[in-house]
Image (cartoon, rainbow, N blue to C red):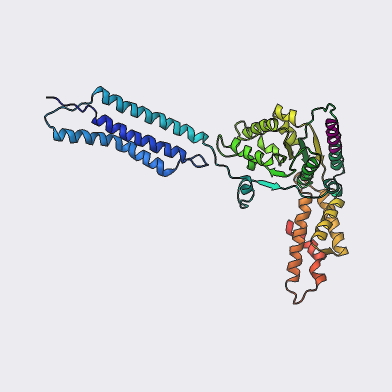
Amino acid sequence: MKRELSGGCGITILAFSLMFIILGIIAVFEMRADGEAGMGALGMIAFFVILLPFIYLGYVLMYKFLHPDEPVKLTRKAMYCGGGASLLIAILLGWAVMSNDRSEVTVKPINEIAQEPKESTDSVVITKAIEGDPYKELDELIGLESVKEEVHTLANFAKIQQQRKAQGLKVPKMSFHLVFTGSPGTGKTTVARIVARIYKDLGILKSGHTVETDRSGLVAKYVGQTAVKTNAVIDSALNGVLFIDEAYSLVPMNSSNDYGQEAISTLLKRMEDDRDKLVVIIAGYPDEMKRFIDSNPGLQSRFTRYINFPDYTDQELFDIFKLYLDKNQYTITDDAAQLLKDNLNRAVANKTKNFGNARYVRNVFERAVEQQANRLSSQPSISNEELSQLNKDDIANAFKARR
C-alpha cells in the first residue's frame, strides 16, 4: 500500500519558515540608527535559509530508510503549506530590505546632543535667555550701528502692533523671521541671542532661548532620518529662536539629491505649523544667502527681512581687543598698543572674504597671552603687574604665531 508524506515535510518547512520570519522581524527591529540591521540576527537568518533544504532532504531520506519499499511524494496540501511559507519569507525579505533605507533614527534629547564631546559631528548649542536689559546690551555692542538701528526699528514696530492688538485694532500680518548676512565674526550669533530676548520682552516668544545649529545639526546621513533629526532640533527651539548658521550649506551648489532639501522642507512646514511659537534666523555670506533664498519659493515668502552685518574697522577691532583685556584683567603697554593698531590696520587693508573680524582679534589675544606666559615662565619671581601686562614682544610674537 502506498504511503504518502501528507503533511510531515510541509509542516517541517512551515515551522522553519516561521522561525525565519520571526528572526527577520527581530533583525528589522534591531536596525541601528545608521540603517544597518544587527549582524547577529542577519547571520541567524542566513544560517536557517541555507539549512532549510537540508532539513527537508534529511526528513525524506529518513522516511525512505524506514520505509524502503514505499514511494515518497508530497500531497498538494503539503506543497501549499511549504509554498505559502516561502512566499511569506520573500515578502518579509523585501520588507526588511526596503526598511533598511528608511529606518527611523533614535533621537537623543536635544540637551544631550548639545553636551556631546567636541568630536561629535552634530552642532547644536542651546543658550538660555539671561536676565538683564537686551536693548542696553544691543546698544553697548562695538560698531554695528546699522544693525542696531534695524533691530530697534523691528522692536518698535512689533511693540506698536502688540499694543494695537491689545486694543482690538487690526494688525497686519508680519513675519519675525530674519536673514543675517555678513562675514564670520561680525556678531550675528550675539545679536540673534539678543533678538530672542527682545522678542520675549515683547511677548512674541514665551521663553526667549536660542538654539544655535548648522547643517550638521539638521542633516542626517541616510534617507528618512533628516526629517526626524530636524524636527528634534525644531522641537527644542519652540517658544524661542532657531539660529541656523551658514544656512546656505543646506543647498550645496550642483547637488540636486542632497538631503539638505529634506531639512528645508521640514523646516518650512514647521514654520507654518508652529508660526506662533517659533522664530527662525538664518545667517551666512550675502551672495550665498541670496542663492539659498532664491532656491525655494517657500524660503522667499517666509524670509523677507534682511539685516546686513558689516565688517569691523581696524579701530573697532582694537576696541574689541581692549574688551578682552578688561574682561580677563590684562593691561597693555603703550608701544604694544601701537604695534597692535598697526597690525590690525594692515590686516583690515589686506583682508580676504574669510577674514574672521572679532574671531581674528580673539585669536590674536589668545596668542598674546600664550607668548606672555612663555616670556614669564623662566623668571624666578613675577610681580602682579608683570602677570597682568602684555608688552610689545608679546604682541609681535602673537602675530608671528598666527602666520
Instruction: Name the residue: 38% across, 34% down.
Output: 21
Q: Is residue 220 left or right of residue 311?
A: left
Residue furthest to the front in view is 167
Residue 70: x and y in percent read 13, 28
Q: In which quarter of the image is residue 62?
A: top left
Q: Quadrant of residue 242?
A: top right
Magenta-highlighted residues: 154-166
Q: Is residue 56 above or below residue 387?
A: above
Q: Is 156 contained in the magenta span?
A: yes
Residue furthest to the top in view is 76
Q: Which of 300 and 171 is in front in this view?
A: 171
Q: In this view, does 288 lie above or below 394?
A: above
Residue 118: x and y in percent read 63, 52
Q: Which of 365 and 157 is in front in this view?
A: 157
Q: In this view, does 178 lie above or below 111?
A: above
Q: In which quarter of the image is residue 108?
A: top right
Residue 79: x and y in percent read 28, 25
